[in-house]
Image (cartoon, grey):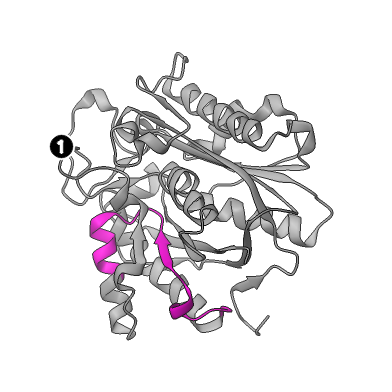
Amino acid sequence: MKENSRVIPFIDPPYFLSFAAVGGREEGEGPFGHLYDHIDESGAFGQKSFENAEGEMQRLCLSLALKKSGLSEHALSLLVAGDLQNQCVASALGLYTFGLPYLGLYGACSTCAESLLCLSLALSHGPFERGAAVTSSHNAAAERQFRLPLEYGGQRTPSAAWTATAAGAFVLGKRGRVKITEGIVGRLIDGAITDASNMGAAMAPAAADSILAYLRDGAHPLSEIDLVITGDLGRTGSRLLCALLAEEGISLGEKHKDCGSLIYDPKHSDSHSGGSGCGCSASLLACHFLPMLERGELSRILFFSTGALMSPQSTLQKNNIFGIAHGILIEREV
């Protein structure tokens, strides 16, 4: 590992044993809706509140991933999870019945890559044999916490994104076909944005910073990477990312795919700039990109989840929104 490098090589890389994606009605109507393992049209998941629904979404998603792996929860040594609710309460509500050693993470919309990065560190450098990472977001719960309840009917700006009602769960172990070989730790980047409806612009500088860090210190040049995937910059943030990288002489071209820009059909949805929420990148990684790697359609991808670190209080106090982008390099075994 190079001095001052943010890229972590995993000497004993963990493999994906299984994965699952769960979503709500809007996700089911999107271009990848048919690939989700479960769609709940109501978004309630049989619960009386949206907050509890998100917890149930995590429980269901991990249960589906375990079923696909053929393992029981007792085969796992560690559970790493996070969501968008205060104190990650959705993860606690949904996962406590598994009775596993648990690390709760809050990285806003960067949580999926952050959880996979932390779990990979534990599996690669620790005594653990298997573990799981779970990430979720719920549109109604997030809107009530960060902005205004849906019933208020407030107008959304063109730069605003639609928080995904979605979850992704990943079971990692020591053997498999698709592995995580490197991790990229993000830095806190001040994008000088105070508008909570323009999170793509707040996160884009952090995404550019982490991508450049990998291209400087990672094991593979851009020519050896099939896709560079960002979490949920949306169309507004993706345009800014491309402009920032162009200033550094980097063009991703068709290699760049943004989960926020992909998850909804812009012609048939009211998502404005696209999708957001940490369940956005988690669910698309599970239902779309990892299956492509397993089928051999892709060999190597860089996956960055991007987060806007803010709270309702920091927004009201007009503090700048800090962005962060954690990443992992995922490769298919040759």
Whether residue 131 sits left or right of residue 7 in the image: it is right
Q: Is mark 1 on a helix, strand or loop?
A: loop
Q: Nearer the viewer, residue 193 or 30?
A: 30
What residue is drawn where x is 78% and y is 42%? 77
For residue 5, which quarter of the picture? bottom right
Q: How many labels does the image show?
A: 1
Q: Position of residue 156 (x, y in %)?
A: 18, 41
Q: Position of residue 20 (x, y in %)?
A: 53, 38
Does residue 153 lie above or below 249 as drawn?
above
Is residue 81 among what the camera can see?
A: yes
Q: Nearer the viewer, residue 259 or 137?
A: 259
Q: Quadrant of the N terminus?
A: bottom right
Q: Quadrant of the C terminus?
A: bottom right
Amino acid type, residue under disc 1 in the picture: Gln
Q: Nearer the viewer, residue 57 or 333?
A: 333
- Residue carrying label 1: 155
Q: Please say whether residue 230 is one of the residues in the magenta stretch.
A: yes
- Span shown in magenta: 218-241
Whether residue 174 sits left or right of residue 157 in the image: it is right
For residue 152, which quarter of the picture? top left
For residue 18, which quarter of the picture? top right
Q: Position of residue 62 (x, y in %)?
A: 60, 33
